[in-house]
Image: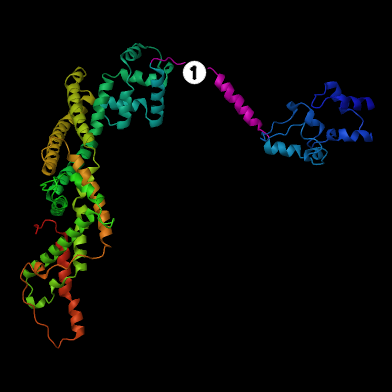
Amino acid sequence: MLLITLTSRSASPGATASPAASEAFRWAPSSASASTSWAAPFAAGKGAGSGDAYRSNTSKTKLKPFFWDKVSANTADDTMVWGHLRAGSFQFDEEMIESLFGCPLAGKKNGEKKEAAAHAPPAQFVQIIDARKSQNLSILIKALNITTQEISDALKEGNELPPELVQTLIRMAPTAEEELKLRLYDGELSRLGPADRFLKVMVDIPFAFKRLESLLFMCTLEDDATTLKESFVVLQAACTELRKSRLFLKLLEAVLKTGNRMNDGTFRGGAQAFKLDTLLKLSDVKGIDGKTTLLHFVVLEIIRSEGIRASRAAREMWSMSNLKSEDLDVDTTNDSDDKLRSIGLQVVSGLGNDLENVKKAAVLDIEGITGIVAQLGHALIKAQNFLNFNMKSVGEEDGFHQSLKGFLQHAEVEVKWLLNEEKQITALMKSTADYFHGNTGKEEGLRLFVIVRDFLIILDKVCKEVKDFPITAKTPNKENLAGATMPPSKKEDPAATTAQKTALAVGPQQKLFNAIVERRIDSSSSDDD
């Protein structure tokens, strides 16, 4: 025993004991008191630090890994806490830790199954078309849950199919070499893959992919025509709104006069017109206070002008009404600045509603619209040629021939109308751009709508800011407000009580006046003052 102990102590630190030495240590008598210092860690038991820890790991259940930073065995000596923990009494339940953190055997079995499946020989198919094309087509057919028979019936009878499917099938058309191989294949269809089998059925139908192109035209014309007609209506209305909007033209007049006053005495002064891009620059010119912009000033001036105009229009309507003059005991010349400003602000704030179609036109894709019209024209010619030349060899009794012939009779009228309407709308947009910018030779129709749309966004923001501005403008002249001769009003009875005056102020006459003013605000077809 002494010899064994001396031998173990003479081993260099960190050296690995030989198997013989391990056996000697394992079977050393545990009754000797001198051996307890080194034999404790090897005491029998299930816990951590038992002799089983030094046996082969092949007999133990593999557990999930616990990632930590190990301290070198040389540094974890008796001077550290770890040296005192080696002889601890803690033991864990081996069965519980295996049940909680063991790697399930099912995973191993599943892995074995997957591995076996991976090594299993794949089903052998005769491959004719490109492998990538075959895979994509197989995925598409499976995803759309459509059978080969349904597609075959559509090509033979002219039945409708989803446009997305038809477009994809056209892109998946076999090359001339692949088509020849498919035609020459005379083996069993079951030996072909799903995509090859599908294309084999397709190529056996006369002019299958040309039929698909005509079928795509048949499936998409109605939706395309509806979209184009809606766009044409918006563009036509947008051009009309820009030309006919009284308030928009009033705003251009105000900007022109204000700009000339700002540029007086410079080469920029004396302008007779300006490009609408200028509207977007009004908010960049700031006043002395650093807050009020040129657009604020223009809007305030138009608000004042429109307030006076609406008040004057209300009195003119009064003068033409059937009411007796003595029944209208309301002096409109006493309209306050607050009231006139409120009326004018309502008018200016409504410019966005007057140009609603301009805002819609600004988001349209003009090039896309033109492209769709051109595509429909080409598709019509292509379908007509296919019917008149290729389908003649098939015979008129063919169901697809009859469906295509009936469709083209309607499609020809529809497509020709769309082509003509597109030309007219394009000409209208150009003339509208020339109406504001002159004959520049550029296609600025859509750009014009975008500029006005962006300006309306800025204008709406400024109107909200102006609403809170303090009133600094002078009260309008009563002579200016009295544009139309007012009927002589009935003199107030000196004996009238204060209560009677108050009742008169909120009576039906005042309500009628307010209603007339609001009605005049909503009217955008009145003449400018």
Image coords of residue 188 (percent x, y): 41, 14
| Residue 347 lies within the magenta run | no
Look at the numbered disc 1 and give the secondary structure of its residue.
loop
- Quarter of the image for residue 157 reads top left
The residue closer to the viewer here, 11 or 412, is: 11
Q: Tell me if 484 is positioned left or right of 500 in this view.
A: left
Image quarter where the N terminus lies is top right
What is the total number of numbered labels drawn onto the structure image? 1
The residue closer to the viewer here, 519 or 490, is: 490
Residue sticking out furthest to the front = 265
Disc 1 marks a residue whose amino acid type is Ala
Q: Tell me if 404 is positioned left or right of 80 in this view.
A: left
Magenta residues, start to end: 102-128
Q: Residue at x 13, y 71 (%)?
A: 333
Image coords of residue 323 (percent x, y): 8, 73
Q: Residue at x 14, y 62 (%)?
A: 520
